[in-house]
C-alpha cells in the first residue's frame, strides 16, 4: 500500500527538481519532467487497476495542519490526465518554444511548466482544505506566468490579467467554501461528509468557484482570450488539464457533500447550455485558437451534462443510468484531454509555420504539412464525436444514461430530454465547426504567401502529436480496457450506490475496430481502382470558370455564417460594411467580428458601473480632518440613536 | 452457416435494391409530367459505367479526395447493417446501436464535406455549408424521433424500438421523419437533384468535382441512405411486430414503395423552397418529432 504513496512523492519531488533544473539544462529538465510524470501515471494506474486507495496522514504540519494525501480512483483519473498531457506538452515545448527562437522566455516556460504540472498533481491528491487552497493558488499563478510568456504583447498581457482576475474571483468563492466548510465541520480535513444535511447549500459556492475554472457558460469569459493568446503548448495544458481541475472540484465535492435538491438540475442545465452555446461561439470564430478555446467550453458542458445526470440519479433512488452518465463524463475528461491537446499542438504547428491565427489567411496547408493536416483531421473526427474514435464512446455513454433516464419516465426525464437534444445539436455543430476549421486551414489553395511557404514541424513536435493520436484511436477501439478504471472512479464518487450496469462496450469496441478496418480497406481498394482506371490531374472544375483564384474559396466567415446567424441573438456579431458605390468605387470594406458577448456586453459594462460608483464614493475621502471628525460624530450619533430606539420597548 | 447466409441476403437487399429507389422516384415524376422518363434501372447503368471510367482529380486535392467517398460508403453500409429489415431483424444489434447509427450518418457527412472542401471550389463550399448547417436541425429532429421510439419501447436498440405500435403519436412522427428524409437525402423542397444551376444545390454541389469510381460510390451511398431513411420511416410508424414474418416483409416492401412514390409526388407537385425557408421547415420537423415525444411520454404516464 505504501508504494503508490512513495511513488507519488517521488513524482512530485522529480517535478520539483525539474523546476530547479528548468532554466539551465533543457534536456535534464525534460528527463526529470518525464520521469516525474511517468511515476505519477504509474502510481495512479496501480490505484485504478487494483482499486486500493492510498491515504496518508503525516504529523508534518503546514500552516498548522497535518499533511493529508489521498490517491483514490477519482484522483487517479485526473493524475493520469495531468501527468500525461504534462509529459506530452513538455516534449512538444522543446520544439515549439525552443531556446533559439525564444531566448528570453524558454527558460521560464520550462520552470513554470513543471511547477504547474506538480501543483495540479497536488490539487487532485491533497485532502486538506487549507493545503488544497495553497496548491490551487500555486497552480493558478503558474498558469498566469505560462500564459504571459510573451508578456511584451499587449493582447497577451490583457489576456493574462483577465485570467488572473477571473481565477481569483473563483478562488474567493473557494476561500468562502473551504472556510465555511472548516467552520461547520470543525476542521480542514476533507472527506465524505454526506451525513450532515446542513452542509448542502455550500455546494453552490463550490459550483461557482470550480465552475469559473472549468469555464462553464456564462463563467467562461476568461477562457477564449487566455487560450488563444497563450503559447500553444500552454493552451493545450490549460484546455486539456487546467479547466479539468474545475471539473475535478465539482465532481469531488458533489460526491462528498450532501446535495441541494436543485443541484442536479442546475448542473445539467449549465452543461447543456455550455455545450450548445460554446460550440455556437466556436463556429463563429475566425481565429483557430479561439475556436478551439470555445470548443473547450462545449466539451466541459458535455462533461457537466453527464455529471448533472448522475447527480439527478442520486436524487432518484440511485438509478443505474446515473452511473452510465458519470462514466461517460469521466471518460470524456480523458478523451477531451487527449484530442484537445492534439488539436492545440496541431494549431501550434500551423502557427509556428505560418505566423498567423487567422484561418482565412491559410489554406492548402496539407501539401506542405501533411502530418499536421492528417493528425488535425483525426483530432477533428474525435472532437466531433464521430466513430470510430474516442469522442464517440464517451458521448455514447452519456447518451445511454440520458436516454435511460427518459425511458424511466420520472421527473428527471424532463431534464434528460432537452439535454439529449442539446447534446445532439452540439454534436452536429461541432461537426460543422471542425469541417470549417480543417477545410479553411488545410484544404483548397493557399490564400496568402506565408501559407504557401509553410513547413512541416520537427520531430519534437510531431512525436507527442502522434502519441496523442494513438491514444485517441486506442480509447476509441478498445474502450473496454478503461471501463474498470471508470467504474472505480464512479464508485469513489458515491460508493457502491449504483447497481452495477452492464454496457456492451466489448461489442462497441469490436464494431469500432471492424469499422476502422473496413474503412481502411475500402479506401485503399478504391484508391487502387482509381489508379488502375487512369487518374488524371486537372484544375478544379468550378463549373467551367477558367480562372478560379484562391480568394474565391469559402472562408471561415462565409463557412460559419449560415449556422452562426441562427445564434445571432447571443453571438451579437458586429459588422462594419462599406459597400461598393458609384462607377469608380474608392474602397469597399467588410469587417466581421464576433465579440465575447458575456464579457463585452455584460461584465465590462457592469464593471464600468462599479468603477463609476466607486469614483462617486471616493469624494467622501478628501483629506479634510475636520470633516472626518464630523463623520465620526455622525456615526456615533447614528449608533446612539439605534441603541436608544432598540431599548425603547 | 445460417448467419453467413443471413449476411449475404442482407447485403444483397441493401446493395442491390437501393439504386431502385431513385429510379422509381424519377419514373413517378415522369408519369406525373406525362413523359416516359428514364428506365427504372437507370442508376444501375450509370453506376456500371462510372465504375469503368477514369478519374480527373483537382490539382489541389489530396488522395483523401478519393478515399473519403469510400469511407462514407462504408459508414452508410454499416448504418444499414444496424437497421432491422422487418422479419429479418438487424445484422448486428446491441444496446445503444441507434446512437451509433445516428453518428455513422454524421461520419458520412463529415467525410463528404471534407472531400468537397479538398477542391477549393466556391460551389462546393456553398454546398458543404448548407449541408452541415441544415444537418444541425435535422439532427435535433432525429434525436427527438429516437427518444420518442425509445420512450415507447423502453429500449435503445433499433430491433426493439421499431416493434411496438406507436398510437396517436405515429402521425406526428411520420410527418417529422418524412421531412427529415427529404432534407437528409437532398430532395425537393430542400434541394433539387435535377437542377443544373449549381448555386441552388446542396448535395450535388458538394460532389461536382468527383468522377469515375468515387462518384459511383457516392451515388450508390446516397441511394442506400435514401433506402435507410425510408425503411426507418416505415418501421417507426407501422406496427410490424404483430404481423407474421411474411406479412411483415410484404408490408415493409409496400411501405417503402409507398414512401418512394410519395417522395416522387412531392417532387412533382412542389418547387424547391427558398433557402431562407429551409430552417423553418426543418424546425417544423423537429417540433413534430418533439410533440410525438411528448405524446409518447404522456401516454406512458397515463
Image (cartoon, rainbow, N blue to C red):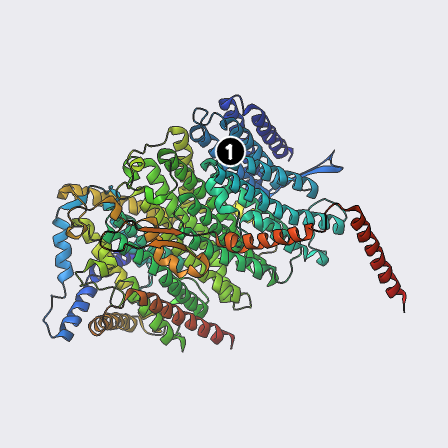
Q: Position of residue A87 (x, y in %)?
A: 49, 33
Relative horizontal placement of residue A178, taking residue A392 as reference (left or right) = right
Tell which of B282 and B223 is nearer to you: B282
Q: Is residue B79 above or below residue B35?
A: above
Chain letter of disc 1 in the image: A
- The picture quadrant where one finds residue A342 is top left
Number of disc labels: 1
Residue A186, percent across and down?
Answer: 77, 48
Q: Is residue B242 above or below residue B156?
A: below
| Mark 1 secondary-structure assignment | helix
Which residue in the structure is indicated by mark 1?
Answer: A149
Does A191 sit above or below residue A113? below
Residue A52, image quadrant: top right
Residue A112, given in percent of the width and then of the height, sits at 55, 32
At 22% across and 59% down in the image, what residue appears? B199
For the N terminus of chain B, the quadrant is bottom left
Rendered location of residue A269, percent (x, y):
53, 60
- Residue B167 visible to the viewer: no
Q: Given the current orientation, which residue lies at the most extreme left position?
A: B36
Q: Residue at x 35, y 35 (%)?
A: A354
Q: In the drawing, does residue A296 fall left or right of residue A645? A: left
Residue at horizontal 75 percent and vertical 45 percent from the top: A623
Looking at the image, can residue B146 be seen?
Answer: yes
Task: Tell me if A602 is positioned left or right of B244 in this view.
Answer: right
Amino acid at each position: 500500500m505504501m508504494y503508490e504513496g512513495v511513488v507519488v512523492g517521488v513524482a512530485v519531488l522529480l517535478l520539483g527538481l525539474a523546476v530547479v533544473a528548468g532554466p539551465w539544462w533543457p534536456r535534464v529538465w525534460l528527463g526529470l519532467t518525464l520521469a516525474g510524470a511517468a511515476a505519477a501515471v504509474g502510481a495512479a494506474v496501480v490505484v485504478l487497476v487494483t482499486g486500493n486507495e492510498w491515504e496518508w496522514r503525516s504529523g508534518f504540519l503546514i500552516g498548522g495542519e497535518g499533511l493529508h494525501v489521498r490517491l483514490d480512483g477519482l484522483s487517479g483519473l485526473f493524475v493520469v490526465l495531468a501527468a500525461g498531457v504534462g509529459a506530452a506538452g513538455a516534449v512538444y515545448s522543446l520544439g515549439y518554444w525552443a531556446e533559439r527562437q525564444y531566448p528570453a522566455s524558454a527558460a521560464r516556460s520550462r520552470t513554470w511548466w513543471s511547477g504547474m504540472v506538480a501543483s495540479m498533481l497536488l490539487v487532485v491528491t491533497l485532502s486538506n482544505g487549507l493545503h488544497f487552497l495553497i496548491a490551487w493558488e500555486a497552480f493558478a499563478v503558474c498558469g498566469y506566468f505560462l500564459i504571459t510568456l510573451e508578456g511584451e504583447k499587449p493582447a497577451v498581457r490583457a489576456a493574462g490579467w483577465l485570467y488572473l482576475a477571473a481565477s481569483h474571483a473563483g478562488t474567493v468563492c473557494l476561500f468562502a467554501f473551504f472556510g465555511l466548510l472548516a467552520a461547520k465541520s470543525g476542521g480542514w480535513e476533507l472527506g465524505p461528509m454526506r451525513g450532515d444535511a446542513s452542509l448542502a447549500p455550500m455546494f453552490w459556492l463550490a459550483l461557482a468557484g470550480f465552475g469559473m475554472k472549468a469555464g462553464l457558460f456564462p463563467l467562461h469569459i476568461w477562457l477564449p482570450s487566455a487560450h488563444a493568446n497563450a503559447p500553444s503548448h500552454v493552451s493545450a495544458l490549460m484546455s486539456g488539464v487546467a479547466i479539468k481541475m474545475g471539473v475535478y472540484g465539482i465532481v469531488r465535492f458533489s460526491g462528498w457533500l450532501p446535495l441541494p435538491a436543485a443541484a442536479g438540475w442546475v448542473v445539467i442545465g449549465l452543461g447543456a447550455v455550455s455545450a450548445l452555446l460554446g460550440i455556437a461561439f466556436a463556429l463563429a470564430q475566425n481565429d483557430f485558437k479561439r475556436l478551439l478555446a470555445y470548443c473547450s467550453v462545449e466539451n466541459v458542458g458535455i462533461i457537466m451534462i453527464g455529471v448533472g445526470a448522475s447527480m439527478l440519479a442520486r436524487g432518484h433512488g440511485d438509478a443505474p443510468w446515473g452511473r452510465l452518465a458519470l462514466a461517460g463524463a469521466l471518460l470524456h475528461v480523458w478523451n477531451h484531454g487527449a484530442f484537445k491537446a492534439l488539436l492545440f499542438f496541431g494549431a501550434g504547428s500551423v502557427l509556428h509555420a505560418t505566423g498567423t491565427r487567422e484561418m482565412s489567411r491559410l489554406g492548402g496547408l496539407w501539401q506542405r504539412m501533411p502530418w499536421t493536416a492528417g493528425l488535425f483531421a483525426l483530432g477533428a473526427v474525435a472532437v466531433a464525436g464521430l466513430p470510430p474514435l474516442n469522442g464517440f464512446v464517451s458521448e455514447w455513454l452519456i447518451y445511454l444514461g440520458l436516454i435511460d433516464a427518459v425511458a424511466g419516465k420520472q421527473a428527471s426525464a424532463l431534464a434528460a430530454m432537452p439535454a439529449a437534444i442539446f447534446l445532439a445539436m452540439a454534436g452536429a455543430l461541432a461537426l460543422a465547426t471542425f469541417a470549417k476549421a480543417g477545410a479553411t486551414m488545410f484544404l483548397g489553395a493557399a490564400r496568402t504567401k506565408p501559407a504557401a511557404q509553410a513547413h512541416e514541424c520537427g520531430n519534437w513536435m510531431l512525436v507527442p502529436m502522434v502519441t496523442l493520436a494513438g491514444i485517441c484511436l486506442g480509447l476509441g477501439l478498445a474502450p473496454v480496457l478503461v471501463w474498470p478504471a471508470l467504474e472505480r472512479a464512479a464508485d469513489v464518487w458515491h460508493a457502491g450506490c449504483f447497481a452495477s450496469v452492464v454496457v456492451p462496450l466489448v461489442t462497441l469496441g469490436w464494431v469500432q475496430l471492424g469499422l476502422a478496418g473496413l474503412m481502411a480497406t475500402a479506401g485503399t481498394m478504391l484508391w487502387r481502382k482509381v489508379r488502375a482506371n487512369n487518374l488524371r490531374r486537372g484544375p478544379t472544375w468550378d463549373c467551367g470558370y477558367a480562372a478560379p483564384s484562391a480568394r474565391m474559396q469559402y472562408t471561415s466567415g462565409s463557412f460559419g455564417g449560415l449556422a452562426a446567424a441562427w445564434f445571432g441573438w447571443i453571438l451579437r456579431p458586429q459588422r462594419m460594411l462599406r459597400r461598393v458605390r458609384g462607377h469608380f468605387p474608392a474602397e469597399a470594406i467588410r469587417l466581421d467580428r464576433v465579440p465575447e458577448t458575456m464579457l463585452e456586453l455584460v461584465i465590462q459594462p457592469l464593471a464600468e458601473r462599479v468603477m463609476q460608483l466607486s469614483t462617486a464614493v471616493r469624494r467622501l475621502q478628501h483629506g479634510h480632518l475636520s470633516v472626518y471628525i464630523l463623520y465620526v460624530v455622525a456615526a456615533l450619533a447614528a449608533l446612539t440613536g439605534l441603541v436608544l430606539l432598540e431599548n425603547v420597548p | 452457416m445460417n448467419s453467413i447466409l443471413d449476411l449475404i441476403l442482407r447485403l444483397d437487399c441493401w446493395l442491390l435494391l437501393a439504386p431502385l429507389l431513385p429510379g422509381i422516384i424519377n419514373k413517378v415524376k415522369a408519369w406525373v409530367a406525362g413523359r416516359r422518363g428514364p428506365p427504372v434501372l437507370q442508376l444501375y447503368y450509370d453506376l456500371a459505367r462510372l465504375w469503368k471510367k477514369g478519374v480527373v482529380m483537382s490539382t489541389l486535392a489530396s488522395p483523401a479526395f478519393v478515399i473519403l467517398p469510400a469511407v462514407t460508403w462504408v459508414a452508410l453500409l454499416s448504418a444499414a447493417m444496424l437497421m432491422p429489415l422487418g422479419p429479418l431483424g438487424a445484422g448486428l444489434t446491441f444496446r445503444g446501436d441507434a446512437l451509433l447509427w445516428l453518428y455513422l450518418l454524421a461520419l458520412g457527412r463529415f467525410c463528404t464535406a471534407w472531400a468537397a472542401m479538398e477542391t477549393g471550389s466556391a460551389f462546393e463550399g456553398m454546398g458543404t455549408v448548407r449541408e452541415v448547417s441544415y444537418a444541425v436541425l435535422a439532427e435535433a429532429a432525429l434525436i427527438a424521433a429516437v427518444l420518442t421510439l425509445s420512450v415507447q419501447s423502453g429500449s435503445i436498440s433499433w430491433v426493439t424500438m421499431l416493434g411496438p405500435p406507436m398510437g396517436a403519436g405515429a402521425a406526428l412522427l411520420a410527418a417529422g421523419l418524412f421531412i427529415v428524409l427529404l432534407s437528409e437525402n437532398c430532395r425537393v423542397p430542400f434541394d433539387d437533384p435535377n437542377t443544373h444551376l449549381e448555386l441552388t444545390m446542396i448535395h450535388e454541389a458538394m460532389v461536382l468535382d468527383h468522377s469515375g469510381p468515387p462518384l459511383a460510390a457516392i451515388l450508390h451511398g446516397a441511394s442506400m441512405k435514401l433506402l435507410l431513411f425510408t425503411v426507418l420511416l416505415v418501421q417507426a410508424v407501422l406496427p410490424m411486430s404483430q404481423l407474421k414474418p411474411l406479412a411483415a416483409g410484404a408490408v415493409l416492401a409496400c411501405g417503402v414503395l409507398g414512401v418512394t412514390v410519395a417522395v416522387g409526388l412531392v417532387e412533382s407537385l412542389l418547387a424547391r423552397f427558398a433557402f431562407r425557408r429551409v430552417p423553418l421547415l426543418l424546425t417544423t420537423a423537429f417540433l413534430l418529432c418533439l410533440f410525438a415525444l411528448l405524446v409518447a411520454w404522456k401516454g406512458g404516464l397515463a
